Each structure stands twice: as structure tokens, then as C-alpha cells.
Image: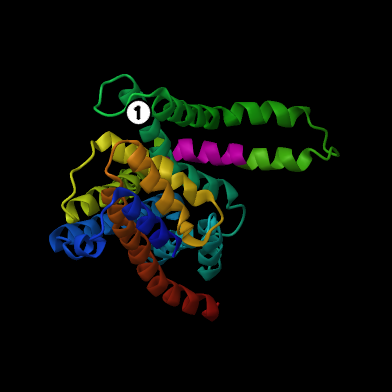
Amino acid sequence: MLALVAAATVAAVSGVVDVGGRLASARPEWLLLATGLELASVFGFIATVQLVFGEWLPKRLSLRMGLVVRAATIVAPGGGLAAVGIGAKALRNGRMQGNRAPRAIAFLLLTNAPNFIALGLFGTALGAGLLSGPNTPVLTFVPAAIGFATIGATLLIPKVSKQRSARVPPSSPRRAISGAARALELGVIEARSLVAGRSWKLLGAGAYYAADNAVLWATFSAFGHVHPPVALFAMAYLIGSAAGSVPVPAGIGVVEGGMIGLLALYGAPALCAAIAVLAYRAISIGLPLALGGLAFIGLFRRVREV
């Protein structure tokens, strides 16, 4: 509902009345391509689930669990971690028992790493004038610095955490914080170990990000809009998607507003951005939720049998 209000406001400001006509003029072949790209993104996510948890999960269960986790990440921030617990209970033989926190953290790191890498690279390239688009520091170098700083800080966690843990007495109230830092440290170590393994499934994390980003590009084409440069798509997608961390179910209204505002700020026509983002969100939310719902039914039946 908030997304529709935002789109209507943008349309009014831009002076374009025939929004319905623009929506009705969608080119179905591009919408089909957008759906296929979102499906590729979902399977990239599943490949990452299999990479991280595959040794504990039978292949069929890892497919179902991947779909459920993907849907859970849409419905609520951190929902994917809860879905990992559901999958663990679904295993009768207990192969996934024990401390799963490091693997869960490694999973979150791997699925989010492409976002920060792309933010750093595209922001730097735009700011340096290597790619066409705005080169204002606040829109380029600042986001890039945040992206690279996040990656650097994450890689330093094992060293910093180990030094701080050694100085905290066992009875100290800070021990709980130290324990959380230790779990994060182990998660980073797990993620680095998985990357060092050079499994082809590592490509899944990149596909999860890139294919979902490409859905937005396809929805621009579906309505005959002039494409902003790829770098602008990437920056608006990354920064706008960050609004999804706000505790609103599926980020509805917040993500749409963030993406539309960022695309307009980076130079895309406001009305074009509004229509394309609404179509993108319909596909990127609807398809994973539909697949995840079907998978959850099968997973829930297995849990009840335990």
C-alpha cells in the first residue's frame, strides 16, 4: 500500500497522468526474462545453502530448505536463521546437531559479501569518472568507503576478537559480549574456509545478488524505459535495498521508496523508476514467496513426522 502511494506521488510530481496506460504497455517478453532472472537468483541462493550446510542435508532437503530460507529472508530480517533451525529439526539422524552458529554466520557473510564488494567497486569507479554517472563524493566515494570498510572490518574480526577474549575474565559481565564476538569470529573463519575450498557453489552467492539486480534492469526494459547506466542500477539497488533492514514485513513501502528515490537521485526519470521498481518488487517478492510456501509445506510435513 505504501509503495502504491509512493508511486502515485512520484507520478503526480512528474506531471504524468496516464500511469495506467504505461503499466498496460508492458512488454511480456521482458517480464518473462525478469521472472527467469529471479529464478536464477533463487537457485543461486540455494547453491549457497548447499555449500554451507550441504554436509548435513540430503540433496532434496537442501533444495526445500533453501527455498524456505529464501522466503524467510523476505518476510522478516534474520528470518533465514530461524528457517535454518527448522531444517535442522527436520533431520531425523541428527547430523545437524551441535553448534550451528558459525555456519549460519558464514552463510550470512557469503550471501551479503557480493553486495559490499559491488558497492565499493562501482562507487569508486563512478567517483573516479571511470563510469558514466554522477561523481559527487556523497553518492560515490562515501558508499564505496562504507562497502570496503565493512569488508575490511569483517576480515579483521578473528584477530581483534581473539585478543579481546583473552583479556576478559570468565566472571566478567562482558563475557556474553565476548562470547558473541567469538561466535562471529568463528563465522568469519568458516566463511574464509569455504572460500578457500573454491567450490563452484561459491558462484551461487554472486548469482543471488547479480541476477536479482538484473531483474530491475529487465523491468525497466519491460516498460520501454531508457536504461540508466549499469553502475547506477547497482548503486541504487544496493543502497535502496539497505532500507530492507527496517523491521517492516518484506520491507514493503520502505524498499520501494528507497530504490525509487535513489534511482531518481542518480538521474533516472522518477516515473520510470517508480513503475520499474514496483514491477521488480512484485517479481522479487512474489516468486520466492510462492516457491518457499510450497517448499515449507513439504518441510513441515517432515518435521511433524520427527
Dot 1 falls on a residue whose secondary structure is helix
Going by the image, does 176 lie left or right of 242?
right
Residue 291 horizontal/vertical position (percent): 35, 68
**The image quarter in which residue 163 lies:** top right
Where does the image place residue 148, in percent across and percent down from the top left? Answer: 45, 27
Farthest residue, direction top: 128
* Left or right for 262, reference 214: right
Kindly identify the residue that appears in the image at 20 percent across and 42 percent down: 227
Magenta span main SS: helix
* 294 lies above or below 119: below
* Residue 232 makes an appearance in the image: yes
Vertical position of residue 119 compared to residue 98: above or below = above
- Specify the amino acid type for callout 1: Leu
Quadrant in the picture for the C terminus: bottom right
Report which quarter residue 168 is drawn in: top right
- State the residue at coordinates (51%, 31%): 150
Task: Choose between 9 and 288: the one closer to the eye.
Answer: 9
Between 111 and 127, the one nearer to me in the picture: 127
Quarter the N terminus occupies = bottom left
**Residue in view at x 56 percent, y 55 percent:** 247
Which contiguous range is marked in magenta? 184-194
- Residue that numbered label 1 is attached to: 121
